[in-house]
Amino acid sequence: MTLAEDNGPERGGDDLFAAEYVLGVLPAEERQIASRRIDSETEFARLVDGWEVHLSPLAAGYPEIEPPASVKPAIDRLLFSSAAAAPAEPRAGLWSSLAFWRGLAVAAVAALALYVAVPYVNRPAEQPQARLVASLAADGSDVKYLAVYDSERHEVSLSHVSGALASGKDFELWMIEGKNAPISMGVIPAGATAHIGVSPATQRKLAQGAVLAVSLEPAGGSPTGQPTGPVVAAGDLKGI
């Protein structure tokens, strides 16, 4: 089965669409559609409320982060500082001096060079996003999961949205990077929510963006190390 891509509300139905709205991963246009539906459709608004309650435990373990103390004073200075006092009028001889203008030009060029260079010299290294999210679904399958990868906790949290597990079978989670062979992340524990630890090698690949997929396997997982059953759900990891 071809892995399904995230294509919006028609891909996973209203329930998954509401979940993606709560997680904040919808494109701007689809988010506007969802906002209008919340105002006009009682049933869709209930789905959104339900997902806010269901997903709130995922954020319970994360304390609020205060910005550095220097940020607000810097913003205040930028927005509200009074204009600098005008300098006293210089003597006429200074303004008519060729040496003065040459010196001023050199200083201006140096200041411009410094202004342009400093952001590049002091630019902090880009940090990978701490959390990525994926909605997992596939055409022709009623199995749906929401997955959140937490790079700080080194785990993937899964919320089971829909789809019953057949007797004697297990769902198994896979990470797919480009055209490489899938890498098993383990059998998904039964229940509404599950947590799967991530190895250091897999962490690096997930941070670069990858596909998560769920396959239906014999009890205990794939006996071969590769998916043996159908892929019942899949989706791309996205930044929150």
Image (cartoon, grey):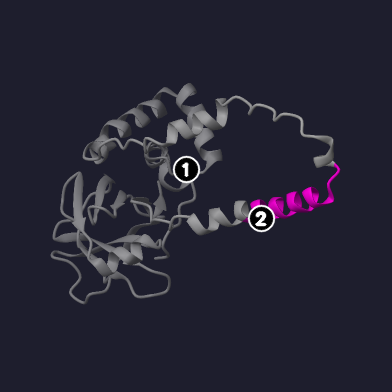
Q: Residues within 10 Å of mark 1 (few under 14, many from 20)?
A: many
Question: Residue at left 27%, top 48%?
Answer: 163
Q: Residue 51: where, in percent of width, then height?
A: 32, 34
Residue with the mark numbered 2: 110
Residue with the mark numbered 1: 26
Q: Residues within 10 Å of mark 2 (few under 14, many from 20)?
A: few
Residue 106 painted magenta: yes
Amino acid bearing label 2 = Ala
Q: Residue 128: where, in percent of width, then height?
A: 38, 56
Q: Residue 56: where, in percent of width, then height?
A: 27, 35
Residue 218's place in the image compared with 29, above or below, is below
Between 179 and 80, the residue placed more toward the observer is 80
32 relative to 55 in the view: left or right: right
195 relative to 95 in the view: left or right: left
Residue 92 can be seen, yes or no: yes
Magenta residues: mostly which secondary structure?
A: helix
Amino acid bearing label 1 = Leu
Residue 214 painted magenta: no
Tell me which corner region of the image, top left, top right, bottom left or bottom right, holds residue 14. top left
Residue 122's place in the image compared with 39, above or below, is below
CA gap, disc 1 to disc 2? 46 Å
Q: What label sits on residue 238 in the rendered view?
A: none
Question: Residue at left 41%, top 62%?
Answer: 3
Where is the N terminus found, in terms of image quarters?
bottom left
Q: Which residues are magenta?
A: 96-113
